[in-house]
Image (spheres, rainbow, N blue to C red):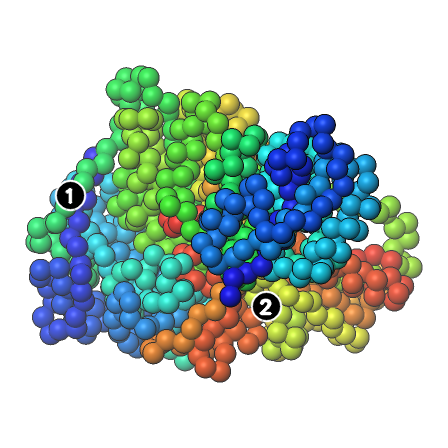
Amino acid sequence: MAFKVVHYINQFFAQVGGEEMAHIAPELREGKVGPGVALEAAWKGEAAIAKTIVCGDSYFAEHEKEAKATILDWVKAEAPDLFIAGPAFNAGRYGYACATIAKAVKEELGIKVLTGMYEENPGADLKKDILIVATANNAAGMRQAAPKMAALALKLMKGEEIGASVVEGYMNQGIRVNFFEKERGAKRAVDMMIKKLNDEPFVTEYPMPTFDRVAPNPAIKDLSKATIALCTSGGIVPKGNPDHIESSSASHYGEYCIEGVLDLTPETYETAHGGYDPVYANADADRVLPVDIMREFEAKGIIGKLHNKYYATVGNGTAVANAKAFAAEYAQKLKADGVDAVIMTST
Amino acid sequence: MKLELGYIQIKDIQFSKECKVENGTLFIDPEVVKAFMYQDDDVKAWVKDFSFDIAKPGESVRITPVKDVIEPRVKVEGQGGQFPGVIAKVDTVGSGKTHVLRGMAVVTAGKIVGFQEGIIDMTGPGADYTYFSKLNNFVVVAEPVEGYQDHKHEYEHAVRIAGLRAAVCIGELGRNVTPDETQEFETFGIIEGAKKFPELPRVAYVHMLQSQGLLHDTYVYGVDAKRSLTTIINPTETMDGAILSGNCVSACDKNTTYHHQNNPVVAELFAQHGKKLNYVCNIITNENVYLADKQRSSDWTAKLCRLLDLDGAIVSQEGFGNPDTDLIMNTKKIELQGVKTTIITDEYAGQDGKSQSLADADPLADAVVTGGNANQNIILPPMDKVIGTLDYVDVIAGGHNGSLRPDGSIEAEIQVITGATNEMGFGLLSAR
């Protein structure tokens, strides 16, 4: 059986009229209208447009709440396999309507959605929330846009894996997706170099992110009264790695009691870290997690106390999001335990 | 400096009592290879025994844990020999004529030293991620002597030497074989090159060598790269076995010796040499862990780029995390000298692809080629045959507790696959 699709378009593409008809309220039509013809043709019988919703761009902008409610009701009643909107090219209000209504259908009805527009269309601001196919900036680009959208739509309906943005033609969602290029990396690097040398435009494969910087807390005035904890991304764990922390790309951290432990020995501790030579850390894990020195400082009264627990993970190839989540969790535990400061060791 | 490579296409490998290369087939007696490996005292001291196997493209075979991959070659004309400063004497290589047994490799495997050995699948989805699935592989599995756990560095060294010796032993069989194809590569002196190609932009290759520490090494003419200052080298020397892998770092972005011998950046720069650019030379620089070393090496790299009056530099990395800082320091400083850069790296963006990919960043690094996200998960179906052992699948970098499933399939990150996200741009994998 063919997949069922509901299509959203504006008054212009429904051939109701131009700007002078942009005020019309949403109407529900049977079957395909306007650009729906090209989409359906590309689906070759595998999917069909059951209903087309036509709405004036000004109406949507000025009565967003009402328009949304009406359209969501209609889509809900139809229960399609996919809701597709546009393509809107560079029409600002149309693009905004397509993206907004698609997002609402996705989030409120749990139905798969797809839209298309020009990258600078204000509606493209929602590209991280919904899949938006990048199109030309005017309707002359329909011939390229329709097959691209149709192909991606079919993949969504079939539940197939969606490839990288450059392959499928959707706007990058800030999620890194692997795919196989046609040329090897070294060739692409040399080609990119030649373009850069000739001041021709080139596209980097990885735009540099802006980094999260954390300002340090004020210094501790009197260390002799402070409780200090040790934490590490160097993978120091009790021998045998009881929590099975991964040697790379760690999915969790460990909490380990060091009550009464004066020294980390090869019999009791080791590293789980796969990113550095483990030999010296395994011989004396204090080299990474300096418990011995901290005990010495404790005995001499240089610090008040070494906290009786330490937290450890493996920093090797571990996603920043994971690392952040680990620390956010155990920072609360450290706080609840009255720890004043943490020495965080890396490798 | 001019080097001629004569490629002898190897289409098949067979065990045989007679050792020879005939009509594209390598006939090899493993006992001969074994005896040649054992001529080395360190191999004798640390390797109890070797076993041998052959893995061909398309076979249902998994090789793991893979340490190094090496292409067998032999010097037939001109100065030097294979792997100067390590196996052959330290004479400068990169000129004359070298025969290459193309389409095959020596793969070393066996008990792990650290966590960084990898997997090569000869068929299935994993095979798409490693070039080595396309080669006829002569696999050398080493069995360490008792008590090797307390002497891992010595054992690692011995296995590395054994692999190189196996490649030399096999390469020698190509000495008197007429190559199927030959290719010439030549770079010129600084002034000579500038006169020859006055209109062409001057481009060098900044080749970053993994040198984070023991078990994370690269050797140049036998010198541990972490003990060397940034320097320059002829591209043809690199092609002729001057640079060797120290065998570690996660499998996916480890530059094996095979990658060094067949460095794709060198090949692609040569392809444009005298056409769209003037390929001046390679700059080799290390990736040490101390900040002072990083500063010194990256300063030196930028300084050499200026000294060579470059217009552009292509920078390749090895490893990730800590070396990301070297990559960015190099790139930023080279750009600040007015030399344009493009860089090749790979990514650790998390299994969901949502995290930042590198541990360091700078807006001047505006031309990046990526070898893909190493954290991507993959399921490798069971294979009919395993060469080596599956004992370490859960603990190698990219595996997790339970990676090896009861039916022999593996669920892990592509990080475990040898060469999957290679940062010399060896493969087709990328990400957006």
Check disc 2 and report its element: helix, strand or loop. loop
Check disc 1 and report its element: helix, strand or loop. strand
Query: Which residue type carries mark 2?
Result: Glu
Return the x and y of residue B389 as percentages of the image width and height.
40, 77
Q: In front here: A84 or B200?
A: A84
Quarter containing the C terminus of chain A: bottom right
| Mark carried by residue A246 | 2
Q: In front here: B30 or B376?
A: B376
Outermost residue on the bottom side: it is: B406
Can you see residue B238? yes
| Mark carried by residue B116 | none
Can you see residue A275? no
Return the x and y of residue A145 as percentages of the image width and height.
51, 40
Mark 1 highlights which residue?
B182
Crowding at mark 1 (Cα within 10 Å: few <14, some 14-19, many 20+): some
Return the x and y of residue B363 as percentages of the image width and height.
60, 33
Query: Which residue type carries mark 1?
Result: Thr
In-image side of A105 versus B10 (left or right) = right
Write the residue at 28% across / 44% down: B239
Write the residue at 62% across / 51% down: A30
Crowding at mark 2 (Cα within 10 Å: few <14, some 14-19, many 20+): many
Write the residue at 33% across / 17% down: B199
Q: Label 2 is found on which chain of the structure? A: A
The answer to whether B367 is drawn above or below residue B291 in the figure is: above
